[in-house]
Image (cartoon, coloured by chain):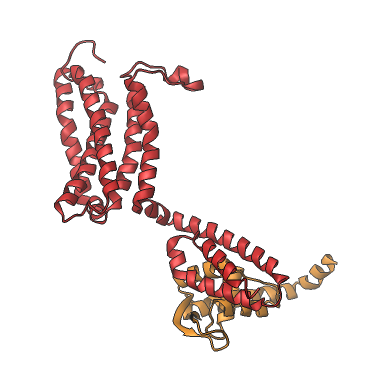
């Protein structure tokens, strides 16, 4: 799919794609990266993570790379996940949507109003 | 926590068994590894054990329900049920129970408690309502029959092949048409034809042939059925019930087919 033509992503899928955008990661690595990326705001459980990964693999957004050992962990071989071109497109599309929304809210000066309303 | 980790791992592994099999086979090992990593991360911080346990249990529980719904909505659940001889036997037995009870009551001429539906259902045996009930019974029997047939690999292929289904449908028609012809010859007006009766006869004949064909093919092939004795037994039960119903209807309705006056 072309940039921007992907449907909006769920928060879980978005965070997983974002976590995989830098490098291939295994399940636990993705969970940790999601926590870092969200500043600790998103804590993803294994059920949510692997459920999302299954659908993402089926949709061609990510793919399983070969099993290998994480030098920082133990000697158990792990399945690593890699973002695909389609997944990168979907992430770029979602980021564009966010960018557009942020510029729109700035243009309409909604952010200060929202903050003021929240006080 | 370090010493207790194997216990938590075993419990988590047990929890993972509630996932649909395809999901478990694909991600079970990775999920266990991830859980082990989370436990290791909390080593030396026993206070976080409770929060981890709660979080993992809730998240995994939600995941299990979600995956089952998705699995079932894609037809995987029903396929899994039908492919498992034990679950199909139980399902078939449960589905056949209401029908069997109904036939027994009809045969013993016991009036079942109808509740508020009584005034609408109290009809003599042989009335269209009874025939309607028999049609429902035929459908009820058809489900376990399909399940039984799907159980055995070779039988499944034979059953799902369009050729066999067509053969069963045509065979059922061939067994019904003679009686239809008899009825037309002896009670010519077209409006006299009990459509429901002939549909039931046709359905029963089709079920009979559809159940019988795979058994014959399975027995002819090398031990095809031997691996599923439960399938043979339950198929035999279905065949007996269908035959009893079919013969009962034919015997009951034969005077009508032959044009006996005042026959209903």
Indicate the quadrant containing the C terminus of chain A: top left, top right, bottom left or bottom right: bottom right
Query: Of A112 and B150, which appears nearest the observer?
Result: B150
Query: For the view shown, which residue lies furthest in the front direction?
Result: B3
Where residue B229 sits: x, y (%)?
Answer: 26, 48
**Location of residue A67 with respect to B32 vertically, above or below:** below
Q: Nearer the viewer, residue B169 or A111?
A: B169
Query: Which chain is the one coloured red?
Result: B
Name which residue lies at 24% across and 40% down.
B236
When asked about the image quadrant of residue B4, the answer is bottom right
Q: Which residue of the protein is positioned furthest toward the bottom in this rendering?
A: A71
Q: How many marks?
A: 0
Q: Quadrant of residue B52?
A: bottom right
Residue occupying image coordinates x 37% and y 54%: B79
In this rendering, the answer to whether B124 lies above or below A69 is above
Query: Left of B130 or right of it: where is A53?
Result: right
Q: Where in the figure is residue B46, as x and y percent of width and height?
A: 71, 72
User: Residue B50 in the image: x percent, y percent?
Assistant: 69, 66
Residue that appears at 26% across and 23% down: B194
């Amino acid at each position: 799919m072309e940039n921007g033509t992907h449907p909006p992503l769920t928060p879980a899928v978005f965070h997983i794609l974002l976590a995989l955008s830098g490098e291939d990661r295994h399940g636990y690595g993705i969970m940790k990266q999601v926590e870092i990326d969200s500043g600790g705001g998103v804590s993803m459980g294994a059920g949510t993570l692997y459920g999302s990964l299954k659908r993402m693999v089926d949709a061609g957004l990510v793919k399983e790379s070969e099993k290998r050992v994480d030098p920082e962990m133990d000697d158990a071989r792990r399945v690593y996940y890699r973002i695909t071109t389609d997944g990168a497109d979907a992430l770029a599309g979602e980021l564009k949507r966010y960018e557009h929304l942020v510029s729109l809210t700035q243009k309409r000066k909604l952010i200060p109003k929202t903050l003021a309303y929240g006080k | 926590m370090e010493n207790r980790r194997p216990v938590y791992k075993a419990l988590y592994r047990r929890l993972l068994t509630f996932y649909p099999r395809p999901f478990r086979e694909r991600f079970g090992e990775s999920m266990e590894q991830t859980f082990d990593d989370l436990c290791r991360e909390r080593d030396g911080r026993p206070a976080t054990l409770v929060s981890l346990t709660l979080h993992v249990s809730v998240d995994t529980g939600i995941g299990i329900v979600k995956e089952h719904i998705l699995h079932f909505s894609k037809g995987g659940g029903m396929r899994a049920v039908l492919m498992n001889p034990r679950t199909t036997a139980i399902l078939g037995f449960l589905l056949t129970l209401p029908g069997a009870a109904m036939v027994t009551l009809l045969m013993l001429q016991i009036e079942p408690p109808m509740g508020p539906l009584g005034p609408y259902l109290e009809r003599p045996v042989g009335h269209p309502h009874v025939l309607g009930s028999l049609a429902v019974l035929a459908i009820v029997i058809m489900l376990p029959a399909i399940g039984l047939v799907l159980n055995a690999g070779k039988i499944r292929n034979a059953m799902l092949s369009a050729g066999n289904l067509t053969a069963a449908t045509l065979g059922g028609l061939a067994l019904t048409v003679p009686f239809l012809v008899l009825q037309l010859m002896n009670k010519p007006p077209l409006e006299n034809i009990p459509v429901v009766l002939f549909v039931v006869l046709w359905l029963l004949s089709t079920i009979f042939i559809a159940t019988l064909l795979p058994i014959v093919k399975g027995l002819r092939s090398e031990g095809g059925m031997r691996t599923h004795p439960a399938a043979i037994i339950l198929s035999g039960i279905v065949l007996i019930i269908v035959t009893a119903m079919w013969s009962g209807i034919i015997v009951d309705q034969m005077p009508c087919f032959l044009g006996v006056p005042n026959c209903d």
